[in-house]
Amino acid sequence: MRGKKNRAFIVAGTGSGVGKTVVALGVMEALRKRGYLVQPFKSGPDYIDPGHHRALLKRPSYNLDTWMMGVEGVKKTFREKAEGVSVIEGAMGLFDGRDGRSEEGSAAHLSKVLKLPVLLVVDAQKMARSAGAIVRGFETFDPEVDLRWVVFNRVGSPRHSRMLKDSLPKGTKVKVIGCLPMDSALSMPERHLGLVTHGDLQKGRWGRLVKRAAALMEKHLDLAPLAGPAPAGGRRKATASPIKRAGRSRPIVKIAVALDGAFCFYYEENLEMLKSFGAEIEYFSPMRDMSLPEGIGGLYLGGGYPELHAEALEANSALREEIRAGAKMGMPIFAECGGLMYLGRSIEVTPGERYSMAGVFSWRARMLRKRKALGYREVTVVRDCPLSKEGGVVRGHEFHYSSIPAPLPGLKRTFTFFNGNEEVREGYLYKNTLATYVHLHFSSNPAMASGFVDTCAAFERGSGA
C-alpha cells in the first residue's frame, strides 16, 4: 500500500482516555521538527482529532473507516493521500469498531487491510506487572494485526518504567519503545462530544501542549523504528494532491460551507468529493458574516457546537433571515447535526435559556444531559432529496446530545435507517433543504455528492445567479 520512500503506522490505544491523541500529536510534531513530511489520518468516524492534526501540520487529515468507506474506499484514500511518514491516529481501543462482534471500523481492521504496524499506547499509571498481561492479550487477540510497538504512558518513576518493561512475558514480540512520565500539562480538555476542538482552545495553551508533548517524545521514545532514517537534504516539502474532477475541467457551481467554532465537523473527503464533481467551495461563518458569499448555488452546514455559540448565532439575524429566504426560494441546503439544529426555530441550551435560529423548520432543538444517539448508520434514501433524486444507500455516523420533538406531523422525510431494532424515518425535507442528524460519508455512495452538486448547479442556473 505504500511507496518505497513512504512510511506509515497507526497510533492506537487500549481504550479511550489513555493519552492516544497527545502521543499522536507529539510524535507528529517531533517527526516534523526532524525534517520529515508528516501526513495525518484518523481511524474511525471522528471529526475533532483531524482538526488538531490540520492545525499542527497545516495539511488536511483524512478519515479512514472500513465500515463507512468500505475496504476499497479506505485503500483508495490512503493510496492517494499517503506521503512521507503517514501517522494514523486510532479511535477508542485498538479493536473497537462497529460492534462487539465485528472488526469493521476499528484500527485493528485498518492495520490488516493497509498492512500497517501499530504503536499501542497503554496508560500505566495504576499498574505494574499487569501491564504485561494487557500487552500480551492485545498481541494474541488477533495475530493478523501487526502490533509491533508499545509506549507506556503516565509512568511514575524510573523504577516504575523498569517494572513495566520487565512485565512483558517471554515470547512477546511487541517492543517497548519508551515510557512517558506523568505530566499534568499534557491533559487535553474534553466536553460532551469529545475533546475540545482546536478552534475553541486557547492558542497559547494548545501550542504549549504540543511543544511539550513533542519534547517528551524526543526524550523518552525511540522514534527511529517508526519513521526510518532522517530525511537527507533538509525538510521535505508537501506535494498538494490535485482534485480530480469527474469529467469536468472547471467548477460548475459555488457552494458555501459554514466553518467556525459552531460548525466545524466535516469529513475532508466529503469536501474534496464535492470539488471533484464540479463544486467550488467558499467558507463563511454563520457567527460573524452578515451575508452569504455571493454567487452561490447551495449551502452546506456541517455539525459542531451551535449550542456553545448560540448567542452569537442568534445575534446575526441578517444571515439567519437570508438563509431562511434562500430555503424558501428553493436554494439547496444540506445540514448535518449541528446544522440541523441551526435550521430550526430555536436551540434551548438549558431550561429557560433559548436562542432563536434560522427558522427554516418549525422544531425547537433542546440540549439534553445524557447522550441521545451514538453509532454507525446505514441510510436508505426513500424519496427525492437534494443529494439523490433516484434514491440509494449511504453510510454515516450519528452522535449528539440534543433532540427535536417528535413526531413532527406533516414534515417530509427522505431517509430510513435502523437505530438498533428501531426503524427511524428521518432526512427532513423542505423544498431543497435537507436536514439530518447523521454525518454522511460520501465515499460510501459518491452519487450523493454528485447529486448535491448537480442540484446546486441547476438552482444557480434557474435563479440567474
Image (cartoon, rainbow, N blue to C red):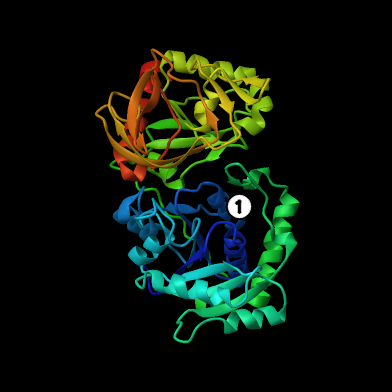
Q: In the rendered view, would you say 188 is above or below 330? A: below
Quadrant housing residue 151: bottom right
Seen in the picture, residue 409 relative to 418 is either above or below; the reply is above
Residue with the most extreme bottom position: 170
Identify residue for label 1: 55
- For the N terminus, the image quarter is bottom left
The residue under the point 47% across, 60% down is: 239
Closer to the camera, 71 or 330?
71
Q: Quadrant of residue 406?
A: top left
Looking at the rendered image, the quarter that the C terminus falls into is: top left
Depth check: give the residue in front, 356 or 36. Answer: 356
> What residue type is disc 1 on?
Ala
Label 1 SS: helix
Residues packed near mark 1 inside 10 Å, few (<14), some (14 to 19) or many (20 plus)? some
> Would residue 260 be seen by someone viewing this image from the given angle?
yes
Residue 288 visible? The answer is no
Q: Is residue 90 above or below residue 306?
A: below
205 horizontally vs 228: left or right: right
- Residue 223 location (% of width, % of height): 57, 76
Give residue 106's position: percent from left, percent from top: 41, 57
Q: Is residue 288 left or right of residue 393?
A: right
Q: Residue furthest left?
A: 390
Name the residue rendered at 52%, 25% in the picture.
294
Residue at the spot 63% in from the left edge and 81% down from the top edge = 163
Q: Position of residue 304 (x, y in %)?
A: 56, 37
Q: Position of residue 370 (x, y in %)?
A: 57, 36
